[in-house]
Amino acid sequence: MTAPIISAVLVNYNAGRELRRALQSIADQLAGSHWEAVVVDNASTDGSGAAVSDFAPHARLLHNEENVGFARGMNQGLAATTGALVLAMNPDCRLVPGAIRALSEELEQFPRCAIAGPRILNPDGSVQGSARGDPDMLTGLFGRSTILRRLFPSLAVSRRNVIAAHGRPGERSMPVDWLSGACMLARRDALNRVH
C-alpha cells in the first residue's frame, strides 16, 4: 500500500466536540488526497474519542489507559503514521480553507525548512502570536502574555519574543526560532533525524 502524503496527529484529552470539528477541517482540506489521521486519546472520560470512527478509514484512535501527556502522545502518533509530511494539531484547532496547501508550498519552496506553522487566530479573529524568538532573560518580562508586552508592544524586545503576525511588507512567510505546537506541518525525515 502506498504511504499517505500527509499524516495528521492529534493528542486528545477531553476535547469534547472540538475534536470532531478539528478532524472535519482536516478531512475538508485533504478531500481527494491520500491521507491518514491518528488521534492519541489520553484516557479521556468525555467520550470525545468516539468521533474518530466517523472519519474512518482515514482516521484511527490510539487509546491510552492513562494521560501520558502531549509529548509522549505525539510520539506515539508519529510512530503509528507514515506520511512524508506530518500535521501536528491540537484538537481545539480548525484549519481554514487552503491552510495545508499553503504550508506544503512553504516546505516545497524552502527545502531546508523542517517545519512550517500557520498564523493562529483566536476565536475572535485576533492573532495569537504563535511564532517566537528564542527565550532569553527578558522573555519572562516581555513574553506573549506579560503586562510589559501589552504596555510596550512596539519595543524591540516585545517584537522579538512574539513575532508580529503580519511580518514584513510583501513577505508571505519568515524564518522564526520556534512555533507554537498548536498546529504545524513538518517533514517526517527532519523529525526522524532529531528523534
Image (cartoon, grey):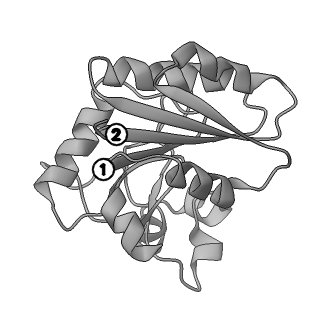
Based on the displayed image, in which of its 4 quarters is residue 12 positioned?
top right
The residue at which mark 2 appears reads as 6
Image vertical order of residue 141 relative to residue 97, above or below = below
Indicate the amino acid at tag 2.
Answer: Ile
**Residue at the extreme front:** 1
Q: Nearer the viewer, residue 79 or 114?
A: 79
Image vertical order of residue 77 relative to residue 52, above or below = below
The reply to whether residue 124 is visible in this rendering is no
Indicate the amino acid at tag 1.
Answer: Ala
Q: Disc 1 versus disc 2: distance between alpha carbons?
A: 6 Å
Image vertical order of residue 37 relative to residue 76, above or below = above
Q: Position of residue 134 (x, y in %)?
A: 46, 76
Horizontally, residue 101 falls left or right of residue 26, namely left
Q: Which mark is residue 157?
A: none
**Residue at the extreme top:** 54
CB under 8 Å between discs 1 and 2: yes
Q: Position of residue 54 (x, y in %)?
A: 58, 13
Q: Nearer the viewer, residue 135 or 60?
A: 60
Horizontally, residue 99 falls left or right of residue 62, namely left
The residue at which mark 1 appears reads as 84
Characterize the local packing of mark 2: few (<14), some (14-19) or many (20 or more) Cα atoms within 10 angstroms.
Answer: many
